[in-house]
Amino acid sequence: MFLWGAATAAYQIEGALSEDGRGPSIWDDFGPIRDGHTAAVACDSYHRWTDDVALLAGLGVNAYRFSVAWTRIQPDGAGPANPKGLDHYERLVDALLAAGITPALTLFHWDLPQALQNDGGWLNRETAHRFADYTALVADRLADRVGLWITLNEPFVHTVFGHALGTHAPGQTLFLDALPAAHHQLLGHGLAVDALRAAGASSVLITNNLTPVWPASSSAEDLAAADAYDILHNRIFNDPVFIGSYPDLSAFGLDRMPGLRDGDLAIINRPIDGLGVNYYNPTRIGAPESPELPFTDAGVEGYPMTAFGWPVVPDGLRELLTGLHERYGVPLYVTENGCSYEGLDDERRIAYLDGHIDAALAAKADVRGYFVWSLLDNFEWAEGYHQRFGLVHVDFETGVRTPKASYRWFRERIARGA
Ligand code: IFM
């Protein structure tokens, strides 16, 4: 069955940051966030989750991708489960199943327990083991009902924005010294796969944020720079999972992946059931202009832009999925695709989604699902509430949800089938 879905993430929609024993996460006090916005209430989905399920049922999707907040399960990132946290997600899962919707559960969508950050966060190898412990707690309760498990969401973005550039929590500016955070997330992924299998989980994915990389020209310098960027953005996060090795990092002056120890790759390379692909736009790369990095972002021009300033290139999704199929040969799920635009009559979102769905279905690849980012307008990280990605408008003063034109369009598109 092809999965038609919508996606969200706990920190972006739930609010209720101090309720039912939830512990602090690295995002709770992070700043700066545009206009000082906070996720204290967000979409209030911790309280309004039945409204969300009703919206999903009305949309006609057969899958919902959401994430579990680690700090609701283990407030300090270790130790026994907080029953109220597990109960919350169990109620959600059961309500989805009752509505005929497959739960697609992401275990880590960036809201690391602050207590683990205090011990070094993902730069500390121990965090990978804590992640596996947390995974086991969730899987022991829900493995019999969750149809699709996603270990990590976008470890590239969490590494680069959170640890290299500091624009996301935990706000570190380590540049290439951030790479151990990538390796430890991937190690955590592999250990979590073992925990999921032990609990009887069936379908397990990792979700990566991926981009087709276009060289700015056919010069040798631009081609080499594009290759280096492809390694950093895409292959570091895919190759060890599906091939069992890291790509050559010599373009970054490294002879091996920082943090890598004997035996790690066998864990990271545990067999899984496919790759989750989050696609937003291609990247155009030219030769380096400074000695720090072996590439420069040359910008994609000549395409319409979303409100976020991201180029709209539907065919990039076909190119990406086809290339992933050729390199890895695994089932692919588009676990996020969408755009930020204002307004309830969101014709530009409809055009965006229509073009990207056609592109996904045209790929020469085994594509098994497509999830819109996002069901709801929500807390867009450092942008606060400024970027609206939802099929459903949320009034952040009142929590009132109003389906947009794109919601009605997506329902009809789903009914037409894959
Ligand atoms: O909102 C984010 C999401 O959390 C991860 N993928 C990209 C989305 C849009 O920026």
Image (tube, rainbow, N blue to C red):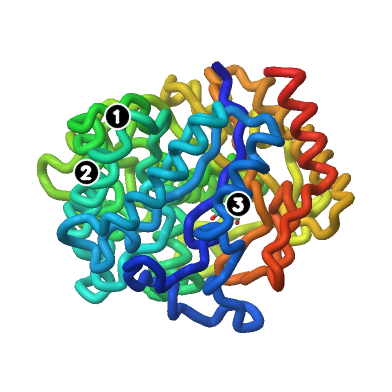
Q: Which mark is residue 201?
A: 1
Query: In this image, 166 relative to 414: left or right?
Result: left
Q: Which residue is mark 3?
A: 285
- Marks 1/3: CA distance? 40 Å
Query: In this image, 307 relative to 113: left or right?
Result: right
Q: Residues within 10 Å of mark 3 (few under 14, many from 20)?
A: many
- Marks 1/2: CA distance? 10 Å
x, y percent for residue 381: 56, 67
Q: Which residue is mark 2?
A: 136
Q: Residues within 10 Å of mark 2 (few under 14, many from 20)?
A: many
Query: In this image, 172 relative to 47: left or right?
Result: left
> Residue furthest toward the left?
262
Q: Where ligand 1 lies, by image quadrant?
A: bottom right
Q: Residue at x 59, y 67 (%)?
A: 42
| Callout in the foreground (3, 2) | 2
User: Please, what is the three-letter code of the amino acid marked with disc 2?
Assistant: Ala
Q: Residue at x 72, y 56 (%)?
A: 401
**In the image shown, does 84 or 366 lie closer to the viewer?**
84
| Callout in the foreground (1, 3) | 1
Above or below, 26 against 319 in this view is below
- Marks 3/2: CA distance? 41 Å
Q: Are marks 3 and 2 in contact (CB under 8 Å)?
A: no
Residue 100: name its quadrant: top right
User: Please, what is the three-letter code of the amino acid marked with disc 1?
Assistant: Ala
